Amino acid sequence: MLEFYDYFRSSAAFRVRLALNYKDLQYKKTKISLVDAEQYTASYSKINPSNLVPSLVIDDGTIIRQSLAIIQYLDELHPTPPLLPQIPLDKAYVRALALDVACDIHPLNNLRVLNYLKNELNHDQDAVNQWYQHWITLGLSSMECSIKSNKFYTGDYCYRDQFTIADICLLPQLVNARRFHVDVSDYPTLLSIESKCQEHEFVLNAYPDIS
């Protein structure tokens, strides 16, 4: 069985939960608490030398790191239902949206970046929050503009009527935006996509339990 190293508030781990649920795959979940610094333990460092989540251990013991690498592996191994369109141009559009999050928004607001701002550079929490809000607002504004004006958006998901890796990357960022008190009403297209995705039980079951 797949072993998935997860943390409920990790947006990267959230992406993988969405993919696992979408593919209806069975897996064992192992919690790595980022708040308690469990990612830095010797045992987990052997699994993921980057000291990040998620990590996925497949049946033969091979370890896959990085959420998008894990998701694309799962999509290639279990191609139905697909997470990418088949047409090359369409596929490039979907991948670009996913990378907007994974390369441009998320790295600047990763927990270790926020901790460095606070602990090493001595910024107070208000300044850290302002940093977070600035970069996520910039990124979500760009995505709102890119999607709503694109021929591939037809009013359902990021790409036509197909749930894709673009939606997988978008949903956790909207959760994070609200957590850091960003006014997401400025992104009606993104909120419409989020609402469509939340019609599915597999999506709702992947959401972090913050109760």
Image (tube, helix red, strand yellow):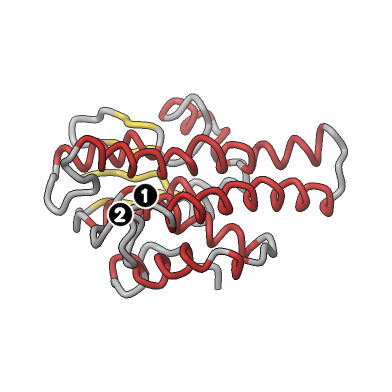
Helix, strand, or loop for circle 2? Answer: loop
Residue at 34% across / 45% down in the picture? 4
Residue at 35% across / 71% down in the picture? 196
Verify CB contact (< 8 Å) between mark 2 and mark 1.
Answer: yes
Number of residues whose C-alpha sits closer than 10 Å to that of mark 2, classed few (under 14), some (14–19) or many (20 or more): many
**What residue type is disc 1 on?**
Ala
Residue 109 position, x and y percent, is 63, 43
19 to the left or right of 30: left
Helix, strand, or loop for circle 1? Answer: helix
6 to the left or right of 58: right
Q: Which part of the image, by quadrant, shows the N terminus?
A: top left
Tell me the mark number nearer the camera, choosing from 2 and 1: 2
188 w.r.t. 129: above or below: below
Residue at 38% across / 52% down in the picture? 150
Residue 70 position, x and y percent, is 31, 38
101 w.r.t. 46: above or below: below
122 w.r.t. 127: above or below: above
Residue 199 position, x and y percent, is 32, 75
Residue 97 position, x and y percent, is 41, 44
Per the rendering, the mark at residue 106 is none
Residue at 37% across / 55% down in the picture? 167
Number of residues whose C-alpha sits closer than 10 Å to that of mark 1, classed few (under 14), some (14–19) or many (20 or more): many
- Residue ID for mark 2: 159
- Residue ID for mark 1: 166
199 w.r.t. 70: above or below: below
Distance between the Cα atoms at labels 2 and 1?
A: 8 Å
Q: Nearer the viewer, residue 49 or 177?
A: 177
Compare marks 2 and 1 and give the one earlier in the sequence.
Answer: 2
Q: Which part of the image, by quadrant, shows the C terminus?
A: bottom right
**What residue type is disc 2 on?**
Tyr
Q: Quadrant of residue 46?
A: top left
Q: Nearer the viewer, residue 75 or 141?
A: 141
